[in-house]
Structure formats: C-alpha cells, structure tokens
Amino acid sequence: MHRLSTHLLSLLVILPAILSPLSGCRGSTDYDVILRGGTLYDGSGESPVVADLAINSDTIAAIGDLSGATARMDLDVSGYAVSPGFINMLSWATTSLIADGRSMSDIVQGVTLEIFGEGWSEGPLNQSMKEEETQAQSLIKFDIDWTTLGEYLESLERRGISPNVASFVGATTVRIHEIGYDDRPPTPDELERMKALVRTAMEEGALGLGSSLIYAPAFYANTDELIELAKVAAEYDGMYISHMRSEGNQLLESLDELITISRQAGIRAEIYHLKAAGKENWSKLEQLLERIESVRAEGLEITADMYTYPAGATGLNAAMPPWVQEGGYGEWRRKLMDPQIQRPWMSFGSDAGSQIPEGNFLKTNPHPRAYGNFARLLGKYVREQQLIPLEEAIRRLTSLPAENLRIERRGKLLTGFFADITVFDPVTISDHATFKEPHQLSTGVEHVFVNGTAVLLRGEHTDARPGRFVRRARTEQ
C-alpha cells in the first residue's frame, strides 16, 4: 500500500479545523457517515491506501485517520475495497427506471451513474413521436409527460431513482423529429432545425451527440449530416459517440467515418461496444486498434467502451482473434497482460436496462450483461484471470468515463467530490446471470452511496432514491 502523500496529510490535518465551526451545528457528531479502515482505490489507477472516509450531506468531507471523529452512520469496511461509484457508459435503463427506480441489477454491482443516448434519446419528442412511443409500450407503460431531453431526465429525478442519470442527445431522435423515417438527406431548413434541437439539448446539459448507424432510420444519415450535428455538440465541448455503421465486414471503413466526423467537426469521439463481429472479421481487430492508436497519437481524442461478454453462450476464446490465441492459453494470457494489447482508453457499459428478478421483468429474456457486466469484470477478468490490476479496472469504471464525459466532481475519491461510493469485496464479487438463466443478481457489493445517501447497505437495497440528473460541465461559449 502506498502512504498518503505529504500534501494530502497536510490537508487532512487542516481540514478538521476548517470544518469545526460547521460541526458545532451538527449536534454531537462530526460527520453524517464514516467508512472506517477500507482499502481506498481513488479512481486514478494508482495503488490503494488504507484510510477512513467521511461524508457530509452529498459530499466527501475527509479522507485519512478519523479515529477521533464521530458520525451518525459509522461503518467498519476493513477488508473491503472502497472506490468511486461505477459509471455505466451505455445504459438502456430509460424505461426500466420508470418501472422500478431502484435500479436493482446495476446498484448491486456498484453502478451509481447510468449514461443513455445510443442514437435514440428520450427527447426531443414531437407529438407524433410521443404517440408512436406510447403505442409501442408493452410490459412497461407510462405517460410521456416531457418533450425535451432535459425534461425527461428531470422527470426521472422527480419520480425518484436510486442512481444518477445523464444522456447524449440521439442523432436518430432529431432526424425522426424533422424527417421521420424517410431515406433521404435533410433539406437545408430541416438540417438547421435538427441543429437547433441538438443545441437545445446541449444547453440543457446533454453529454454530446450519440448515433447508432447500424439501424434504420439512423443509417439513412450520411457523414456530412453527422458532421454538421456534431459541430453543434463540439461548441459545448460535447462528445460524439457512435455505434458505428458496421462492426463486421465494413468495420475499418466505419472507423474511418468516425475519425472523419471527429476531425472535421473538431469533436472528441467514442466507439460504443467496440468489437469485430464475425469470425471472418476477427483479423481486422488488430488493424482497428492500431488505427485508433495512430490517430490518438496525432491528437484526436478517440476512446471506446465494451461489455464483458461474448455474443454467444461460450468462452472468451470464441470472441478472440486467432493471433491472440496462437501458442496456447499461456501465450494468450501473456499477450493480454502485455501493456501493448491493453488499451487505457477502454471503459465499460452494459448495453442493457437495469432490471430486477420479479414482476414483469421476468417476462423478458435479457442478455446476462443486464445483471452482471461490472461484477464480471471485477470477478472473472480481474480476480480470476488477472488480466488487469484491480486499480486499473476501477479507473476504467470511474475516472476515465467521468473525464471523457466532462462530468465534474465525480469519478474519484477526493474531498469536495460528490459522495458516489461503492464498497465491495474483491475476493467474492461475482456475476451469476447466464444466457439460459439471466435473472440473477450479482453479489459481493456491500454498500453503495449515491450523492451521500446509502442506497445499498450490507448488501440490501434501502429503497432510497437520491439519484440526480447529471449535466455536462458548463463551458464558456
């Protein structure tokens, strides 16, 4: 374990004196919550330290030796990993949170922030889109009492949800809003209205522009249309994030399109659930990664996310290209451990709703990633296969996506940051969902705090719903 830095220790000595006038008005306790003796992974990727952590209201108030302090809730977390709450880079909990705001399958994995907007977003909506979405509802039924994306996210907050939420504005959504489902480019006037819709969403706090070009009517959009929309998001330091036009036969060409959009719009870009689909395309994966590294070296900010499952119910070897597996499992493992195969710009998303194994949810057959994506990373790939260190896995679940998304005061364990915190047992954290029996909650997470409020305590959901609409950091225009 690394010792705390001199700077941090100095801060911790000074901090009680700074807080003492405030603590006087808190009655007989110094803090709302103290987590004692945990192994703190601060989200930076650096080695952990053993320390106490205190929470006041929605904020991390102190980190260090708090043996003389008292709190309303005092938890011994010695032996547990204490980390920032996990960020789900690709969530489809847009309607499941309306049905059940507890976000059970993700909360029990330590997820504290759900990111929406893979091409489709729940705003902006016109009247015909509202009617169409209402007619399409099946097991989950609800009134659409919003119009803009910001209004939708605010409505979730009012309904009461356990995790925080944020969203990209969907390129598909603004296209349907103005063009419907026609296979044609927008007229100049339509394009200007589409750009205005993106601008409104960005003003409301959207993270950027999301596309999903493998589906209709999204693939009717040409590259120039996407560039024009992305330019608007770039004005606000937003990100362009895309399910690319092809993940198979045209994989490399699709990457070139994403790079072109990034370069010409002057915008950061991310690839949703990066993969090479189909055995005949596995050999392209190395070229894809080399191309990304090349343009990153030029200064383009290109990142990616993935989910931790192969497409079918089989082993990871079925999704690995032959060049990785050459030489047997020992050589395969060595290659995956090599810092040159590992990509520090890869984060994680479930590409699923947040579910609960009861009621109408049991009438569906979701991908197991809805229940186990994050626990699988920490249990299978960190603990069992030792493919990456725990501190690096946590960085990719916390500070990496927070920084990519330009989200302030989240993603790290630092005083003054929001108290989104996950406490888990690295020895036992495990996923249990399978393709055959997906409705099984993961285990091993002990406590989860969202904005300073315990939503999971001793492995049990508290029914607290302190989740908020998280907006992109404001920039000067």
Image: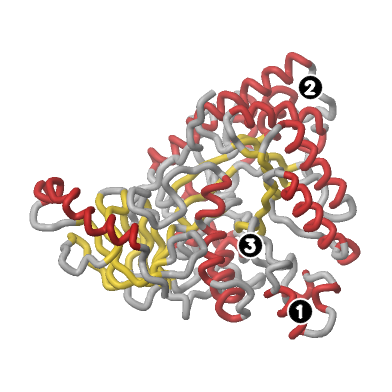
The quadrant of the image that shows the C terminus is: top right
| Res 396 → quadrant | bottom right
Disc on res. 158: none
Q: Which residue is mark 2?
A: 186
Q: Nearer the viewer, residue 9 or 109?
A: 9
- Closest to the camera, between mark 3 and mark 1, is 1
Q: Which residue is mark 1?
A: 332
- What separation in Å lies between label 3 and label 2 (alpha carbons)? 38 Å
N-term mark: 3 or 1: 1
- The residue sitting at 82% across, 61% down in the picture is 285
Q: Amino acid at mark 1?
A: Trp
Examine the rendering and report whether any part of residue 314 can be seen. no
N-term mark: 2 or 1: 2
Disc on res. 365: 3
Q: Position of residue 21 (x, y in %)?
A: 12, 46
Judged left or right of residue 159, residue 272 is right
Q: Secondary structure at mark 1?
A: helix
